[in-house]
Image (spheres, coloured by chain):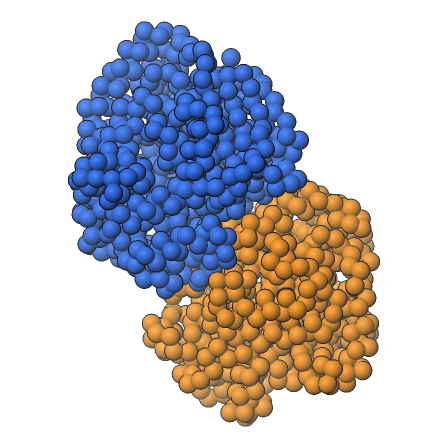
Chain colours: A orange, B blue
Amino acid sequence: MDKIVRVDMTQKEIKVQALPPVYEGLGGRALTSKVVCEELSPSCHPLGRRNKIVVATGLFAGTPLTCSGRLSIGAKSPLTGGIKESNVGGTAGTKLARIGIKAIIIEGKPQDDTLYFLKLDKNNCELIPVAEYYKAGNYQLAKQLRKIYGEQIGVMSIGPAGELELAAAGIAVTSVEGSPSSYAARGGLGAVLGSKKIKAIIIDDAGSKIEAQFHDKKEFIRISKEFSRKLIEAKRVLTKYGTAIEICENNLLGCLPTRNYRTGAFEGAERIGGEAMNDLLKRRRGKSGVACMPGCVIRCSNIYNDENYQYLTSALEYETIVMLGSNLGIDDLDAIAEMDRLCDDFGLDTIEVGGAIGVAMEAGLLDFGDAKAAIELLKEIPKGSPLGRILGNGVEITGKVFGVRRIPSVKGQGMAGYDPRAMKGVGVTYMSSPMGADHTAACVIPGRTGFDPNKKYNVLKPDGQAQLSLEVQIIVAVLDAMGLCFFVGPNIETLNTLVSLHRAKYGSEITFEDLVSLGKEILKGEREFNCGAGIAPVHHLPDFFEEEPLPPHNSIFDVSYQEVADKFLSIV
Amino acid sequence: MDKIVRVDMTQKEIKVQALPPVYEGLGGRALTSKVVCEELSPSCHPLGRRNKIVVATGLFAGTPLTCSGRLSIGAKSPLTGGIKESNVGGTAGTKLARIGIKAIIIEGKPQDDTLYFLKLDKNNCELIPVAEYYKAGNYQLAKQLRKIYGEQIGVMSIGPAGELELAAAGIAVTSVEGSPSSYAARGGLGAVLGSKKIKAIIIDDAGSKIEAQFHDKKEFIRISKEFSRKLIEAKRVLTKYGTAIEICENNLLGCLPTRNYRTGAFEGAERIGGEAMNDLLKRRRGKSGVACMPGCVIRCSNIYNDENYQYLTSALEYETIVMLGSNLGIDDLDAIAEMDRLCDDFGLDTIEVGGAIGVAMEAGLLDFGDAKAAIELLKEIPKGSPLGRILGNGVEITGKVFGVRRIPSVKGQGMAGYDPRAMKGVGVTYMSSPMGADHTAACVIPGRTGFDPNKKYNVLKPDGQAQLSLEVQIIVAVLDAMGLCFFVGPNIETLNTLVSLHRAKYGSEITFEDLVSLGKEILKGEREFNCGAGIAPVHHLPDFFEEEPLPPHNSIFDVSYQEVADKFLSIV
């Protein structure tokens, strides 16, 4: 039986229930967004009593299917004011499945400032008042919790940023090797967990005997194996270099955010790219090809050591390197890795913070390229000073406070590492996703095809990008519901595989069309929630993207607002 | 001939044109909102090249009609991100009419930081580079400009807050006695003027012989006189005590914002109310019954002297006293007057700043009731420090940066001096006005009747408030278009008088229904602009108004969102 753990932080009560019928058959984002839409008033304050934080595993969590252990975390976002689903790897999803928990819903709000651990194991769910660890960094916390509860636990936790309820605060999830380096980073969900006074969720699957049930186990394993085999083949480059391999590619494409989106190419790109990092990892006895989730065959993560061969940070990834690197005019991997470590420890979204520091550079608070000043500025955040709180509340607040004209955000959320002028489908995603400027909603990079695998698109041209982004958003919503990492490929081949896997696991008669309908339903529900929160479905990009030609292609963002609005409003 | 002055700040060029046909017959807010809708992209950055600031006189400016010299200033607001019309008395409207200028449109953006004066007189319109006065306060500036250009000028100017482009910056307009105390305060239009690098607009009507033209002058004068006579009779209390007379009334009604909207009654209300102030004005040899506009018979303004009988500030009004007084738990009129003086001098909206300090008190930065700390905090704003910039960007930004749950704002704009839980029609206005939480859009206080003068409403009950606020918003939009102060009374009697006046002045066949249609058209156009800017037409109030009962009536805000949305979306 799938269990749902309902934690009332006003009364400090936990109820373990069977999944209510209204949520049956749903997983991941389909479930988190459904709970948010069903149980929340869109007008509730994101940090108030009436917001809820919802954690849900995907439909294949706990099975041997590779890349299926992603966890969805949903709430009303303090960053966007709208609905949020932030999606994370690491060990928590699998461990929750192993103790039979489908979802956690944390609601209410304590009257006092005591922090709690929420500890879940095969027998118990309990709230443990935290005696120490106030304002503790995620690294120290994860280490101590493993000492106390054993190496087998998975931890979801917040750092000082979450305790300060800053809108750029994320939720760290421990990876296979135990560091708090997987991140439900976007949308400020760490602040929501902080507002509920939960410092960490500890998932202990020791001794659990729950195993996944299958309608046709043999068939499921057969499809899974075939799926893994293809992925291993297709993702060799990603396994070797990690996502950082995209840096030089996107630099050549001219869409690499550089100095707060002033140019799309960075002269220091090669020094921070995948090849350079791979060389460094080898010299420093770091690791590439690391899996963040158990059983992942893509293994795009890594372990980054400092010059003394000591662990510094892990999963130095594309978005982090771009937003804290080229976006700040910084070409020093060690400086970027240090900032990544600080963000992971403080509990901050590297994309949002990188964007905010870029905007602060634009405002003249520090110079582009000044890594030392950027690190100092970042250290201001956990202090809770006015300046620290400004930055910790993200790109848009920072830009507004300092009167910056060039603020790369949509719906309150900072953009990721793709300049929409030279990767126009991503621009459409930024305009139209219920999540705000979130590349994970549909990262329309070259080669994406949506529903028609034979269709060709030019990332520099507006033609067809509105439809393409919509299709990829639908497919990604399905992957998010299934708990699959989108690196498996948001395409119809994956969707067809999911149909077969769903049938094998659940004995369902589900079809491709059913999955597409599911994706549309998710987007539609999220859009309606946002409307109730006063947020229009489709936004223009900030006007400098329509006005300033982006070197080297000197392209502007020219996908028609009306076309995007029409496409996205047509989902019924 | 009505002239329109178009100032291109990119090229530093001024064109004086006849009013284009598309704008003919429009005045005040009808004209500013039309220009904003016609000429601006809703996606433009409020502080960027593509925003425009539009100044327009009403349809009766320059005539002897009392209270008809209000000036509308429109733009895309840096505070709300939507359309704004901010409405101001003082001398500028009449003086513009006297030199034949119907409207000023300031567009483009200079490449450098040089500030300019825009000087307009009967023969010339010129841009004068400013040699000094950078960061000068409005008081010093107004004084110096009168020395240089003569006592007869009218001045519209920005203080340091506008130069810093802070979203709480307003535009000061000199009053009859020459002080910069009339304010187009709301929506951050001072920041827009600052972004255009205009420090002041100087209107010199010396020697102008332009007189208002009439279809039937005798009839116009007759109606005007009758209108004045009735107003003098009806507004005796306002003339004697100023708008501060409402403080004790609203305290009794239980809707007086106190300590960041925690209660609706303030134990110090009598010490800051109209009677107390009137006594003080007498003792200090100040003045009450002062007209801010030439020819005003209501004369609700005043001159407030310090304990040494020296001028301290003028027009210490209801909103200022509430938002910097009871809202902060401060019951000391001298402290409130000092803050008002500082706001006028720095160029800040007292409502927005009072709200922001209230939220800072809520966040624990200073204590409620601590006037000294509040004054010090206010002085932080023109310094441009991170803390100063936070506050100077208004209530909502301050609340978000400091993680405050109780933020009294809608569409980015701080609420005025009426708690919506105990004055529910004003709450509807906050929810639905295209301007954000702006009481001037429809201040639905007791006695307002909308289109049916016999209908009775209870401010504590939700019944009929949605319809009432809509009707008053329509009437107010008409008054704003005509350039009339809303203290003449936003009711159908006034509208009928305006029909007669319009016919007498223009020889039109205009009807009551035409005026209602005009009001609806204004609201509809503004709403459409906001939609393009990603702002939903109707917002919920912040959730604490729906959750926390407000003492002394312990009422919550319970007007149905759906009812409000349905009513307001039905305007076609």
Q: How many marks?
A: 0
Please state which of residues B334 and A476 is positioned toward the viewer in this rendering.
B334
Q: Nearer the viewer, residue A569 or B44?
A: B44
Q: Quadrant of residue B472?
A: top left
Observer-nearest of A289 and B456: A289
Q: Determine if residue A50 is in view.
A: no
B130 in relation to B545, above or below: above
Q: Position of residue B73 (x, y in %)?
A: 47, 32
Q: Is residue A119 above or below residue A449?
A: below
Please tell me which residue is depicted at 43% across the width and 80% down the height of the picture.
Answer: A116
Query: Residue placed at 34% from the left, 44% from the top?
Result: B340
Rendered location of residue A6, percent (x, y): 42, 74
Residue A38, compared with residue B155, is above or below; it is: below
Residue at 64 percent across and 72 percent down: it is A340
- Report the side of A296 relative to B116 (left or right): right
User: What residue is shown at x 40% (from left), y 25% (from top)?
Assistant: B151
Of B499 and B417, nearer the camera is: B417
Could you say which quadrant of the image residue B320 lies in?
top left
Asked whether the viewer can see residue A454, the reply is yes
| Residue B510 position within the rendered picture, expressed as x and y whole percent measured from the top left | 40, 15
Position above or below: B136 against B391: above
Looking at the image, residue B262 sits to the left or right of residue B343; the answer is: left
Q: Position of residue B183 (x, y in %)?
A: 40, 36
